[in-house]
Image (cartoon, rainbow, N blue to C red):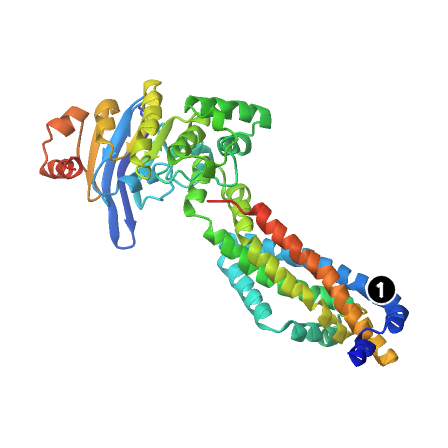
């Protein structure tokens, strides 16, 4: 059975045609842990994240959620996904629905809640990200930062065991990044288990329990933020950090 | 000018044939509504089935759609009316026109809906699936509402263009407005009934054009 880890990625391989994007990745995420994944673009970090809820099907290896291998045949992936929230780089809010409609959709259709109950829960989630007053706004009426916070509300409303963040601030104007990171920080403080792929090194320094550095489909180095950012043992990590912090 | 008025605007002739033209008008309206509803619903159903990406079925859909988009509607109409009885199917001219035009509209509509479905960003599917909605739920709650909105302008244009083809039913003896006008024209030896038919078509299709413009505005949203 489970050894207590929320997510366990075991010897994960993924190829797109001839291109091997993941070459045997192992990751464990303990409850309430924030695991931060850094690495150059094309290093496979987003693909690794997307394998955790099977938006990408691994070529080989396994992904365990609370000890259950979700890559084997016969798994009810829709049910598993209700336990795994995901936040995307491009927000992906539904443009034909209001903010509260976005948050309530899965509550109603997947958790089968009545409209009133779903909306109560959705309001709670929107309050949690500080946007309840925008409940009736459509995505096109919100700033990028607000849209991303609604997307986070959509994820937390399902009360998942872990949330995967795929470059959540990369599409935002610099002045809007802070509000999204603040929400993520407060989720962390409340004990949400999180896996974050991002380039926000300062956030990683502040909030991460562990940092993984990925390059060319492998995890090159892993450690605490201090170990990675201040005392890296690898030339590749050092080069990458120099490149991203230089400007 | 007087010669023109006598030929096209003879009030006495118009008055005499007005009841017949109105009968024809109702047939045209009934046929048009049936074609619009059947064609748009069938087209949407085909596009939804196509979204399941089952190879054999998709080949059949694409084959059907391409044939019915390629053939002139008049040819389809005539084939249905004159060829189907040979294989034992005897449909009235009205039913032939209804089925033939519905299939043509369904073919064009399927392609338009399909283009709409494929133009919905992949991230919409992923966001929905990541919260546990199934493929079918995602298609109906997330993708189709966006796809249909995107398709409203081309769809209304195509719907009007094909629905006007109800006039083609005059070649297979359907007593729609143009048939009645032509018959009256022959009896009266005067083209004024045709003028009435033209007015009749404007009465039907002008509101449809205006309605489509209203729908386009209502369902447009800024990205």
Classify residue B4 by image quadrant. bottom right
Classify residue A236 by image quadrant. top left
Quadrant location of the N terminus of chain A in the rendered image: top left
Q: Secondary structure at mark 1?
A: helix
Residue B15, above or below B207: below
Q: Residue at x 31, y 28 (%)?
A: A178
- Where is residue A3 drawn, in percent x and y? 31, 24
Q: Residue at x 74, y 71 (%)?
A: B169
Residue B197, above or below A205: below
What's the chain of the residue with tag 1? Answer: B
Q: Horizontal placement of A64 versus B113: left or right?
A: left
Quadrant location of the C terminus of chain A in the rendered image: top left
Residue in the foreground of this view, choosing between B214 and A60: B214
- Where is residue A202 drawn, in percent x and y? 22, 28
Residue in the foreground of this view, choosing between B46 and B123: B123
- Where is residue A6 drawn, in percent x and y? 34, 26
Q: Residue furthest front?
A: B1
Q: How many marks can you see? A: 1
- Where is residue A148 drawn, in percent x and y? 39, 33
Q: Residue at x 69, y 59 (%)?
A: B206
- Can residue A201 be seen here? yes
Q: Horizontal placement of A220 versus A110: left or right?
A: left
Residue in the foreground of this view, choosing between A137 and A96: A137
Residue A196, above or below B173: above
- Can residue A76 be seen here? no
Residue A161, above or below B106: above
Q: Horizontal placement of A94 versus B96: left or right?
A: left
Residue in the foreground of this view, choosing between B8 and A171: B8
Neighbourhood count class around disc 1 (C-alpha, 10 Å): few under 14, some 14–19, many 20 upward: some
Residue under circle 1? B23
């Amino acid at each position: 059975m489970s050894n207590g880890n929320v997510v366990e990625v075991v010897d994960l391989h993924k190829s797109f045609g001839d291109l091997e994007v993941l070459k045997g990745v192992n990751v464990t995420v303990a409850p309430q842990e924030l695991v931060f994944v850094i690495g150059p673009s094309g290093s496979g970090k987003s693909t690794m994240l997307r394998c955790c809820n099977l938006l990408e099907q691994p070529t080989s290896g396994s992904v365990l959620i609370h000890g259950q291998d979700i890559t084997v045949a016969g798994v009810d992936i829709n049910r598993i996904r209700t336990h795994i929230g995901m936040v995307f780089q491009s927000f992906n809010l539904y443009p034909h629905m209001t903010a509260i409609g976005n948050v309530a959709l899965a509550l109603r259709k997947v958790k089968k809640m009545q409209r009133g109950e779903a909306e109560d829960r959705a309001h709670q989630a929107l309050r949690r990200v500080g946007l309840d007053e925008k409940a009736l706004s459509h995505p096109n009426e919100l700033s990028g930062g607000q849209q991303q916070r609604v997307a986070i509300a959509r994820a937390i409303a399902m009360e998942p065991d872990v949330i995967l963040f795929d470059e959540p601030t990369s599409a935002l104007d610099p002045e809007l990044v802070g509000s999204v990171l603040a929400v993520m920080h407060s989720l962390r403080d409340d004990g949400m288990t999180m896996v974050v792929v991002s380039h926000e090194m300062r956030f990683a320094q502040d909030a991460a329990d562990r940092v993984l550095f990925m390059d060319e489909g492998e995890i090159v180095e892993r450690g605490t933020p201090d170990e990675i950012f201040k005392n890296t043992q690898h030339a590749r990590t050092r080069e990458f950090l120099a490149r991203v912090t230089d400007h | 000018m007087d010669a023109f008025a006598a030929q096209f605007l003879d009030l006495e002739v118009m008055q005499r044939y007005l009841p017949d033209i109105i009968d024809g008008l109702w047939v045209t309206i009934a046929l048009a509504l049936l074609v619009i509803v059947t064609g748009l619903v069938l087209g949407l159903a085909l596009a939804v089935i196509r979204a399941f990406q089952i190879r054999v079925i998709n080949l059949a859909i694409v084959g059907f759609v391409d044939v019915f988009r390629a053939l002139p509607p008049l040819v389809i109409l005539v084939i249905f009316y004159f060829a189907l009885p040979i294989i034992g199917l005897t449909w009235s001219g009205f039913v032939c026109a209804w089925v033939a035009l519905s299939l043509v509209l369904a073919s064009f509509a399927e392609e338009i809906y399909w283009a709409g479905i494929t133009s919905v960003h992949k991230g919409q599917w992923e966001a929905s699936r990541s919260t546990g909605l199934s493929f079918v739920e995602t298609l109906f709650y997330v993708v189709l509402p966006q796809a249909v909105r995107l398709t409203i302008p081309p769809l209304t244009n195509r719907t009007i263009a094909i629905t006007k083809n109800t006039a083609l039913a005059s070649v297979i003896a359907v007593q729609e407005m143009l048939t009645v006008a032509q018959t009256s024209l022959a009896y009266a030896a005067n083209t004024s009934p045709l003028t009435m038919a033209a007015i009749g078509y404007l009465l039907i299709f002008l509101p449809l054009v205006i309605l489509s413009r209203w729908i386009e505005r209502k369902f447009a949203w800024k990205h």
